[in-house]
Amino acid sequence: MPPTPDSDDFIDYGSLRALVVDDSPGMRNALRLTLSNFGITRIQMVANAAEAIFQIKNRSYDFILCDFNLGEGRDGQQLLEELRHGNLISLESVFMMVTAESHYEKVVATAELAPDDYMIKPFSAELLCSRLTGILLRKRAFRDVYWNFQEQDLNAAIAACDTLILGKPKYAVDAMRFKGELLVALGRFEDAENLYRQVVSMRAIPWARLGLARSLHLQKKHDAAEEELRDVLEQAPEMVVAYDLLSDVHLEKKDTVAAQEALEKGVAISGKTVRRQQKLGEIAYGNGDLDAASAAFDNVLEKGRHSIFVTPADFGNLCRVQLEQGDLEAVADTLKKNKSTLQANPEGQLVMAVTQSMVHTRTGNQQAAVKALDMAASLRAGGARGDAQLMLDLAGACMTNGRNEEADAVVAEVARNAHDSEALLAKAKRLYDEAGRADVGTGVLATATGDVRKLNNEGVVLAQRGDYKTAVEKLLTACDEAPYNPRILMNAVWVMLKYLDQVGMDETMLETARTRLREAERQAPGHPRLGGLRLQMKDVENRFGIQRKAAG
Amino acid sequence: MTFDGTDFYAALIHELKNDLGVLSMALGGIPLRGEAAHDAAVDSARLLCQGMVDRLHQALLIYKADHQPIHPVLDACSPHDLVQAIAASAHALARDRLHVETAIAADTPVLWFFDRELVEMALVNAIHNALAHARSSIRIEAGMDAGCLALRVRDDSPGYPESLLESVADGRPYAATGTGLGLRFARLIAHSHDNRGRRGELRLGNDPGAVFSLLLP
């Protein structure tokens, strides 16, 4: 019996708004015909990712049907990543990928970046309708979960998952999957571990074992995590995300060679993911494997040509490795090929200036080197900032060209913003050693980190004593000194939330706390402390009856 | 990655499959005129084309399975939804030529663990066979059988030839062409599903029409 309008299973296709993304006009028309076959009539059609994003920013779509292969420009997966990353589509919208091969799904098996479903070409209207109905009904069942999640009320979202687990057997396993991710986001790693064990005891399905390995890793049970991952990979060797996690586990165990090997295996299966290539490049560079590093950084730029995850730092990374390989021609080539991209913003211009200063220093063309350094200085004065590694490159070039004061200021800035990063401080120290200024370096680093450390420690101690007002002052001063230091930012947010909780509401301070928390999220995405801080922020907002503005 | 002869053939088959896919969609878009001569010709072209796409798809998977075992990506799936999806595909293929029905036994679990994509491909294969031989109807069934999820495609054809049933019972390889290729593929998929040492099975039988059963542990 077909479902009637008032039944739980009824989907009113006539009310759905659909977006079809396909670069072939013939295919677009075929898909429109397919959709209209089961009643979807409000259909917008676009040819590429840029047009899709424009449409989606203008109005929301209930259903996006997107071809993986979109010709020149971003592919379907990159579009999906951009939509999810920029919060441009809500969890209620359905995103389906159309592909020509069944291999696709197995490579992109991370929940966060996976589409809701994928269709293998060619497919019938009947099959598409049957799949779409299934997804829409599932999303309907998850309505409370999604709503609470989007309101950042993760505890309520967990409670909604529990309701599904107990009351809707069909969605119980899906609800457990979502709940596992919520537990991890809240830092409840042990609870997550137990949940994943429960799923695995039903059946050892790959995502549950991966979740188990992740929650073990987050509890610093690295050997157990590694063992689980090796098992997962034996069962599902194409699960690339397992290699990513395995690499993280090796890094925690300080085995950087094994970390590189794990990522290389992942890249061999799927080399398109920019983040994976970036990480491989960084680790290989740290291992002194310049060939692997330059190949990876090269891939970042090549595969990520249309990806939003490529930043000016990636150009700097490739040039640095090419320079260390002594391949000046390759550096010149990289800069030339990417000139227009780099010229487009001050950060890119800074990368160019710093790289050129290093090249000219290397070839002994001091005049040109000085000119590049002047350029870098004026960009910095205008507020341009590079990643820590680039800034240390700049400091190095300054020292070689006798601009010691400028070098010290740059190093001090890096050190303030990374006062607890042993690796970066060691790199900075090496610069001074090589320049024969070891004593000066020790002084610069000690002063820079000392100031920040002192403000931070005083703030934390004051807060522990209950003097929140002075604690906030100290930590906000520390934030001014080190505006990109994740540890300082997170401590400042923590103290401000304490203040609001204990002393009372202060709109300005709450806004400051929000801004600082956003910066901390930018500087240290995925840091385990962030989940807890977000939750405390939510509690404070709830207590003072502030409704968080809807995201986006 | 090397690009030796076999890889070249795999890439070629892949491209042919995609081209045929586009052709199949184009054929599907040709409106029927209500004239038997025209409509029957278009319909058989459409079916043949779709059958070729599915077969090339299988050929690629079998080629891959020659080099490394098929690793199903298990997840919790709804057998009910699967039966509906297969019925939808069967209906699209059969149009009005055959009657498609479904039967879901009361003991069918709400969720079962299998690779939906692979299992769908095996069943669609059986649908193609049934379409070629059934007289008037196809039935898609789900139920439990000795602790396994049983997915069946049943038709009212005269049944599988004896020689084929014997070779399945003996585990001998079937002919690598036509029906044999598809069955070999379905058996690979069934076997790749493993639950604590228990493997899936493909069973063929006549009752009195052909019965294709996939048993998933």
Image: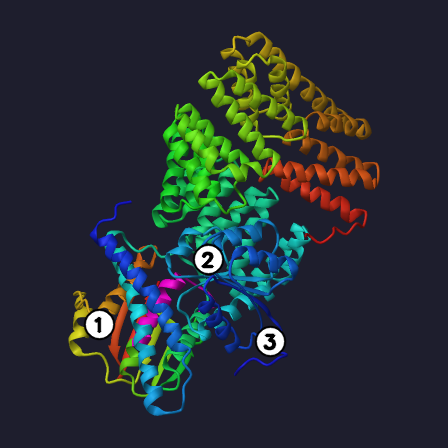
Circle 3 SS class:
helix
Asked if A172 appears above or below B101 in the picture, the reply is above
Nearest the eye: B148 or A252: A252
**C-alpha separation, residue under disc 2 versus residue under disc 3:** 27 Å
| Circles 2 and 1 on the same chain | no
Tell me the kind of residue under disc 2: Leu
Q: Which of marks 2 and 3 is in front?
A: 2
Q: Is residue A77 magenta?
A: no
Q: In which quarter of the image is residue A265?
A: top left
User: Chain letter of disc 2?
Assistant: A
Same chain for mark 2 and mark 3? The answer is yes
* Type of the residue with mark 3: Gly
Which chain is indicated by disc 1?
B
Query: Badge 1, how many Cα within 10 Å: few under 14, some, many 20+?
Result: few
Q: Is residue B96 above or below residue B84?
A: below
Residue B147 seen anywhere in this rendered image of the structure = no
| Colour style of the rendered protein structure | rainbow
Give the labeled residue for mark 3: A14
What residue is disc 1 on? B178
Amino acid type, residue under disc 1 in the picture: Gly
Q: Is mark 2 on a helix, strand or loop?
A: loop
Q: Earlier in the sequence, mark 2 or mark 3?
A: 3
Kindly report the distance in space between the C-alpha atoms of the residues bearing marks 3 and 1: 42 Å
Q: Residue at x 42, y 28 (%)?
A: A322
- Comparing labels 2 and 1, the label whose residue is closer to the camera: 2
Residue corresponding to mark 2:
A70
| x then y, percent, for residue A478 | 72, 25
- Point out residue A27 in the picture as x, y percentages from the top left corner: 45, 68
Magenta span of residues: B109-128
